[in-house]
Image (cartoon, grey):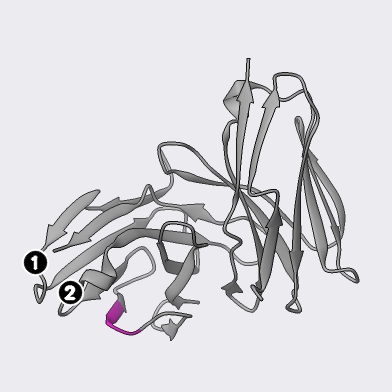
Amino acid sequence: NAGVTQTPKFQVLKTGQSMTLQCAQDMNHNSMYWYRQDPGMGLRLIYYSASEGTTDKGEVPNGYNVSRLNKREFSLRLESAAPSQTSVYFCASRDSGLYGYTFGSGTRLTVV
Amino acid sequence: KNEVEQSPQNLTAQEGEFITINCSYSVGISALHWLQQHPGGGIVSLFMLSSGKKKHGRLIATINIQEKHSSLHITASHPRDSAVYICAPYKNNDMRFGAGTRLTVKP
């Protein structure tokens, strides 16, 4: 089925460890996004990529890096995980115009 | 003050009732997005609109750009409508999300 695929679905890290969250979409969308969702708060934008080869910071970029490897894939890297990065992470993509976003199923990350 | 305010935060309804969820925002936008988050966590895009009204099945979304206000209506609500509904004003690749309205529809 067409959509946005995120891996892994669950991850537990120790403080200071690094990891990369993977995201891939097969809808030929130009724009891709990484969000985090914390209890009682709205989703917040970490980074986005308006097109292949470009990335921009969002509202909460500190502690994260991203790579737009090609049009399909947009990865999020935590170089040195901190407990404050415990959250649910969502990847999303969209085409141009007033079309809705397509979200991945999320990655639940716990940093201990 | 939050940029995006949704009301109510929680809503319980009986099956068949007409539901209204409101969203007010303080930022200038080019469009507004309504999303549905299921109990399992998955997020689905419902509407993205920049003016007037959009309808999809039993769901209707309206927006008044001048008043910075949008509403999501659900007609003939059903238990399967139970979810968190999120509004997200959008401009220039930047969406700001409300905290959501948790809707529970009882049979």
Give the letter of the chain under mark 1.
A
Viewer-closest of A99 and B42: B42
Residue denoted by label 1: A14
Three-letter code for the amino acid on which mark 2 is drawn: Ala
Question: Which portion, as a residue range, is magenta?
Answer: A62-66
At 75% from the left and 30% from the top, the residue drawn is B57
- Return the x and y of residue B89 as percentages of the image width and height: 68, 67
Q: Which of A41 and A63 is in front in this view?
A: A41
User: Label 2 lies in what chain?
Assistant: A
Q: Main secondary structure of the magenta part?
A: strand
Callout 2: SS: loop
| x and y percentages locating residue A26 in the rendered image | 40, 53
Measured from the top left, where is residue B88 in percent x and y? 64, 62
**In the rendered structure, does residue B41 fall within the stretch colored magenta?**
no
Query: Which is more N-terminal, label 1 or label 2?
Result: 1
Which residue does the image show at 40% across and 37% down from the upper left?
A: B40
Q: Residue at x 29, y 73 (%)?
A: A69
For disc 1, the neighbor class at 10 Å (few under 14, some 14 to 19, many from 20) is few
Which amino acid is tagged 1?
Lys
Q: Distance between the residues labelled 2 and 1?
A: 7 Å
Q: Which mark, residue A81?
A: 2
Of all residues shown, which one is farthest toward the top? B107
Label 1 secondary element: loop
Q: In this view, does A37 lie to the left or right of B8?
A: left
Left or right: A112, with A76 as reference point: left
Q: Image quadrant of residue A75?
A: bottom left
* Residue A10, position as x, y percentages in the image: 21, 50
